[in-house]
């Protein structure tokens, strides 16, 4: 069904083995005849030997003393490993998940940065909850985190709940391990929610597979659509992060891109909202003659990758196209 959108078939290239993660994920997600056990073993052997080995100590991923650091900390490497396809079948995923819970989980169900006192962040809570759901972690903390997410959805369908209010607050956290003043904005209805936190929370609720969250998910998506976040060229957030939705990248932690946003939209009844047309066309215009997409950005929170044709990004676009095709097929049969 998705072939009508493609200039050429990218699957032989995606699954050529050059990128073990995209090869594994493409087989699992698009090829039902794959031997999943063997494919997972191949993924473990390849990535453990060539990538994660130097970032694994005592069965915990990343830098345990600097959990929050992008490209270095435990949180980053846990999210990255799950995104690459690792799950609870591998011991270090279970042990790292438990380590993160012990260090960052708060009594009300959220996840904090490694600051004192710990204050949950909507984006951090959602990113970790989604990863743990995807990895098949069995824990009561996950249910509490989902409850935290729904309880902190704002009046306009968005999420915010961030302790940062500018560069000074960010430096205060990194240098002194203290929270900033940003949490005071949470109850101010005149302050807009955060597009990154909102997309992250939508993704976490969606990953649960629980239809009870449908209304919350759609409210979050309406916030993104109605506030034109899918047509932004760039925006500096309260935390100092600069998002550039129009540039193709692969978000991992507290980031935002058009492909991921449309993936979540195409799962819902809002899949044919007119506001989706422009961002969808912008993505499709960037398709190469080979049926692939090029990585354009690897800013903070994105997976680091060389600019140019990228297998993981292309796979993400194919996920989006598959969801759209399924909705179109259902619409045609109705």
Image (cartoon, rainbow, N blue to C red):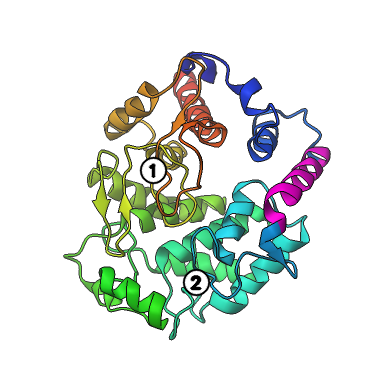
Horizontal and vertical percent for residue 192? 22, 60
Q: Is residue 287 left or right of residue 326?
A: left
Which residue is located at x 38 percent, y 58 percent?
A: 197
Asked whether 245 or 159 is in front, the reply is: 245
Read off the residue under disc 1: 257
Q: In the rendered image of this protein, does residue 5 appear above or below residue 234? A: above
Q: Mark 2, residues whose alpha carbon is within 10 Å: few (<14), some, or many (≥20)? A: many
Which quadrant would residue 61 be assigned to in this image? bottom right
Residue, far bottom: 117
Q: Is residue 201 left or right of residue 276?
A: right
Horizontal and vertical percent for residue 99? 65, 73
Q: In the rendered image of this protein, does residue 30 appear above or below residue 270? A: above
Residues rendered magenta in the picture: 37-53
Tell me, for residue 111, which label it has, or none: 2
Asked if labels 2 and 1 touch by Cβ distance under 8 angstroms, the answer is no
Horizontal and vertical percent for residue 78? 61, 60
Q: Earlier in the sequence, mark 1 or mark 2?
A: 2
């Amino acid at each position: 069904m998705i072939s009508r959108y493609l200039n050429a078939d990218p699957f032989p290239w995606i699954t050529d083995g050059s990128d073990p993660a995209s090869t594994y994920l493409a087989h699992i997600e698009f090829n039902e005849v794959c031997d999943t056990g063997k494919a997972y073993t191949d993924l473990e052997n390849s990535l453990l030997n060539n990538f994660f080995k130097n970032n694994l100590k005592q069965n915990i991923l990343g830098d345990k003393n600097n959990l929050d650091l992008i490209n270095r900390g435990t949180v980053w490497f846990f999210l990255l490993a799950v995104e690459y396809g690792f799950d609870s079948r591998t011991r270090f995923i279970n042990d790292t998940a438990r380590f993160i819970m012990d260090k960052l989980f708060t009594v009300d169900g959220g996840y904090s940065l490694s600051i004192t006192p710990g204050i949950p962040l909507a984006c951090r809570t959602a990113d970790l909850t989604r990863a743990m759901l995807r990895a098949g972690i069995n824990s009561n903390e996950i249910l509490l985190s989902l409850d935290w997410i729904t309880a902190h959805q704002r009046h306009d369908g968005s999420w915010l709940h961030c302790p940062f209010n500018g560069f000074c607050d960010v430096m205060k956290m990194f240098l002194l391990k203290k929270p900033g003043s940003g949490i005071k904005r949470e109850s101010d209805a005149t302050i807009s929610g955060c597009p990154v936190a909102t997309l992250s929370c939508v993704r976490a609720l969606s990953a649960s597979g629980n239809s009870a969250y449908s209304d919350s998910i759609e409210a979050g998506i309406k916030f993104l659509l109605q506030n034109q976040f899918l047509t932004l060229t760039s925006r500096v957030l309260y935390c100092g992060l600069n998002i550039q939705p129009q540039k193709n990248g692969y978000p991992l932690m507290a980031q935002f891109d058009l492909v991921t946003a449309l993936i979540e939209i195409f799962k819902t009844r809002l899949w044919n909202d007119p506001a989706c047309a422009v961002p969808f066309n912008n993505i499709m215009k960037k398709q190469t003659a080979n049926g692939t997409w090029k990585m354009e950005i690897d800013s903070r929170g994105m997976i680091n990758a060389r600019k140019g044709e990228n297998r993981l990004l292309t796979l993400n676009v194919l996920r989006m196209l598959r969801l759209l095709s399924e909705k179109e097929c259902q619409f045609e049969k109705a």
